[in-house]
Amino acid sequence: MPATTKKLPWQPFHRNDMLPPKPPPPATTGVLGWLRRNLFSNWWNTLLTLLGLWFIWVVASSLIEFALIKAVWTGEDRNACLPKDGVEVGACWAYVNAKFNQFMDGFYPADQEWRYLTVYAVGIALLVPLLIPKVPWKGLNALLLFGAYPVLAYLLLYGAPSLGLPIVETTQWGGLLLTLVIASVGIVISLPLGIVFALGRRSQLPVIRFLSIAFIEFWRGVPLITVLFMSSVMLPLFLPEDVTLDKVVRPLVGVALFAAAYMAEVVRGGLQAIPKGQYEAAQALGLTYWQMMGLIILPQALKLVIPGIVNTFIGLFKDTSLVSIIGLFDLLGIVQTSLADAKWSTPTTAPTAYLFLALVYFFFCYGMSRYSLFMERHLHTGHKR
Amino acid sequence: MSTTSNNTSAIASAASTDELAVQMIDVNKWYGEFHVLRDINLEVFRGERIVICGPSGSGKSTLIRCINRLEEHQAGRIIVNGTELTEDVKKIEEIRREVGMVFQHFNLFPHLTVLENCTLAPIWVRRMPKKEAEEIAMHFLEKVHIPEQAHKYPGQLSGGQQQRVAIARSLCMQPQIMLFDEPTSALDPEMIKEVLEVMVELAETGMTMLVVTHEMGFARQVADRVIFMDQGQIVEMNTPEEFFTNPQSERTKLFLSQILH
Amino acid sequence: MKKIVALALGALMTAGVATAANAGTLEDVKKKGHVQCGVSQGLPGFSNPDDKGNWTGLDVDFCRAVAAAVFGDPNKVKFTPLSAKERFTALRSGEVDLLARNTTWTMQRDTELGLNFVGVNYYDGQGFMVRKSLGVTSALQLNGAAVCTNTGTTTELNVADYFRANKMQYEVVAFEKADEVVKAYDEGRCDVYTTDRSGLAAQRLKLKNPDEHVVLPEIISKEPLGPVVRHGDDQWFDIVKWTLFAMINAEELGVTSQNVDEMKKSTNPSIRRLLGVEGKFGENIGLTNDWAYNIIKHVGNYGEVYERNVGPKTPLGLARGLNALWNKGGIMYAPPIR
Ligand SMILES: Nc1ncnc2c1ncn2[C@@H]1O[C@H](COP(=O)(O)OP(=O)(O)O)[C@@H](O)[C@H]1O
Ligand SMILES: N[C@@H](CCC(=O)N[C@@H](CS)C(=O)NCC(=O)O)C(=O)O
Ligand SMILES: [Mg+2]
């Protein structure tokens, strides 16, 4: 073929004027665009969206009807919440109102309530600034929260006659107060303990490694309910006659150790994700083992497993409800016990009680979950790799 | 096994131990069955710059990592800075304080800023006041030409910048010996140059350096000695001129012919 | 499960691990300054906290009566809520001095488990509840019925025995929690609801229209509920036992919390002995002679306690039935104080 007739299948091209940026076509941004793209992009999606909306409507409307519209807000006893002319009423909030004090603190003496309210107030005052990254003095704050605060909380909650605070025995603690005590002590103990056992499991020393594995696998291998049952039923039989371990301390230790075992595995996952080079660089600089772990490895590893840690916290918080089977009146226990009061027995008392429980537990667990998401994002923007 | 025995050392050596930064005597190491270091004997004099080269898997990294106990040797003796490496953790930490190391993959601490990377060890290991540590850190960051990056995180820097931070981080401990394990192998060509420049400048200060590298230009320019390793053994050791112009061993010749063209 | 726990406990006890607090309970109690009483975690009419958080109920009042007998003060008592499972261990280990937790007196518990039942403070028994509209008047007409009950309880076994003995067919609908059972029954998922009669009365309050339901006359099991102490301390056993008997005797003798001060002037020798005006009955069991006076004055006689907690005027509305005195058509009977 003669070269002159050969024609390129493309045109040579060059540009001198650069294109300015243009806005995207309408209805792919903004609320409408989002709706169209995500919910109504084709007939099948539209159908699913409508089905979903219908489902939400059915659930939400009956819930609203029960919890708000047909609810009974005031009353002295069960008569207020009995069916009216054969028609069942909604939630019996009058009952929650009558029992509210008990739900909050169990049998804590009424004239001493200021004590645990003070503990709450100081706790919030110390915890909130610690949780907000921007607030300075984190070290001092943490020292106060984890050092001074537990002592204060103990003195206030349990009492100290020498300070003019009469003793309030733990058997009188209950309701949300007890749930929060067990959960927060469990959380505060299980994280450091879990870290120690996670490190132990990766230790070079066989004895430490073996002990750590034994601990972790033991506690992971038994159901919490068994642990609690053992601690309340069997433990007293083995202890000497005059040694009686406090009825609240027993499950407290059980819950904390149980959570520590799970925490250890979560932390171990984080440790495994840290590259070998980080250890080597730290060692090469002459850091000791604990310096290396505390300054280099753990800060990175823990950050990686924040979702897992918070997950364990949430699990622990909900697991505290199991202590109600060993005769402790945590929030679940006291609410269930109140159902036995014939004064308030009605067809809607139990549903009301469980709705109330669900709302309280949801408030705390959802709060933790949101905070963990926030923390994850916050730490992420700090220094992306 | 006796530890530091100074001048009365039983080691057959031309030099007194005072002049020696590192002394390796009949060092052997195995990974399981695999004999990775075989009868290594090496004396590094203070202020000396040694380049180690050799094919991949020949044991170069293992050799220098034995010097700061990132790897443990199983036979023979290693004496660093007058202290013999044993199981003794205190001795190991003592040696690591005096021996800096730069890795192929930088291994900066990603959760700390550049400045914090540099001040961490002086503050925690040397117990230096924070202010002083920061002054020293800025001094060395200037030496590696990136003082303006001090408050960034490692993830925000280029590879070459990261490696220079890693060098500064090691220097902040003011070590007597510096180990480099292929410091430029993970870098793009234009970044290799900036790192090598820093290393040349460091060499000019009289630092004792052991450098595993394939940068033969660097070896020619600064090395007092070049060591060629293969199959866990030192195959050839000579001055750079002799090594490059007049290699003795067949293996060295083969290796040089492969990398120099 | 129950059996295993019982066996384990039995084994532990014979091994002598827990020879806890055998003798000297009275001294211990006096030293502590209160009676530690094991109760339920909430059982309507027997032990449950009221709106103010005060424990109330038939069993609770019995605990208060023991405190009144020992200290002359019904408030020197602390309550330990116990689950059905842990109740016996708590007593064995000395965690509680006394168990008043609607516990059925059985031979195995009285002997093998190392416990002593001091008597019966409520005669219960398993019964049936049905819809009036069913037109059934006797449990023997329940052939083919669907029966709602709790899983894994003696109630379930009792009902099986009863239907088999009477050659009737039935279908069981069982749930874990009482609240689930009553809901299922109310929704018509079964024809019959069976549990202890005191439980039936309590659960009935949760029905939408309690009036549309009726409890059938048949009682298919004996559930004598009574306070329990541990083996090995006869003095304490006596005190608790005679606290119960004093309450029953007081009712029989017409002594109430209202008239007890008057009654001290009574010429009836039985009343004089009961109230410590004559004899040294209190001192003989390690108490003061006005021990029974204190019980009646501060807690009341058995009838008062019954009416207050479970009687017809309470939401539970349980008629006396078997729990009436022996001379009033029931079987409540106490040995005389003499
Ligand atoms: N931890 C280890 N376990 C087993 N074998 C290893 C280990 N580290 C290195 N090796 C082997 O030892 C040999 C030498 O490794 P290395 O010193 O890293 O070589 P170089 O740095 O010269 O490339 C290689 O064959 C490598 O596969
Ligand atoms: N009287 C029987 C049953 C006692 C019992 O456990 N009753 C159940 C209800 S029928 C109960 O106490 N439930 C509430 C609770 O466990 O707290 C016994 O002694 O075994
Ligand atoms: Mg290498």
Image (cartoon, coloured by chain):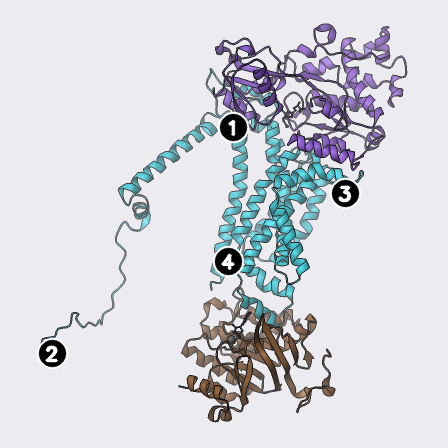
Chain colours: A cyan, B brown, C purple
Circle 2: is it few (<14), some (14-19), or many (20+) Cα within 10 Å? few
Q: Which tag, 4 or 3, sits closer to the chain's start?
A: 3
Q: Chain of mark 1?
A: A
The disc numbered 4 marks a residue on which chain?
A: A
Distance of label 4 from label 2 (alpha carbons)? 64 Å
Residue receiving disc 2: A3
Same chain, labels 3 and 2: yes
Q: Position of residue A252 (x, y in %)?
A: 66, 43
Which three-letter amino acid code belongs to the residue tagged 3?
Leu
Distance from label 3 to label 2 (Cα)?
Answer: 108 Å
Numbered label attached to residue A351: 1
Helix, strand or loop under label 1: helix
Are discs 1 and 2 located on one and the same chain? yes
Which amino acid type is marked by label 1? Pro
Disc 4 vs disc 3: Cβ atoms closer than 8 Å?
no
Q: Earlier in the sequence, mark 4 or mark 1?
A: 1
Q: Earlier in the sequence, mark 4 or mark 2?
A: 2
For marks 4 and 1, give the one nearer the viewer. 1
Kindly identify which residue carries mark 3: A163
Measure the C-alpha gap from mark 4 to mark 1: 41 Å
Asked which quadrant contains residue C204, the reply is top right
Point out which mark residue A379 bears: 4
Of circles 3 and 1, the one toward us is 1
Q: Quadrant for the N terminus of chain B, please.
A: bottom right
Q: Are marks 3 and 1 on the same chain?
A: yes
Question: Which amino acid, mark 2?
Answer: Ala
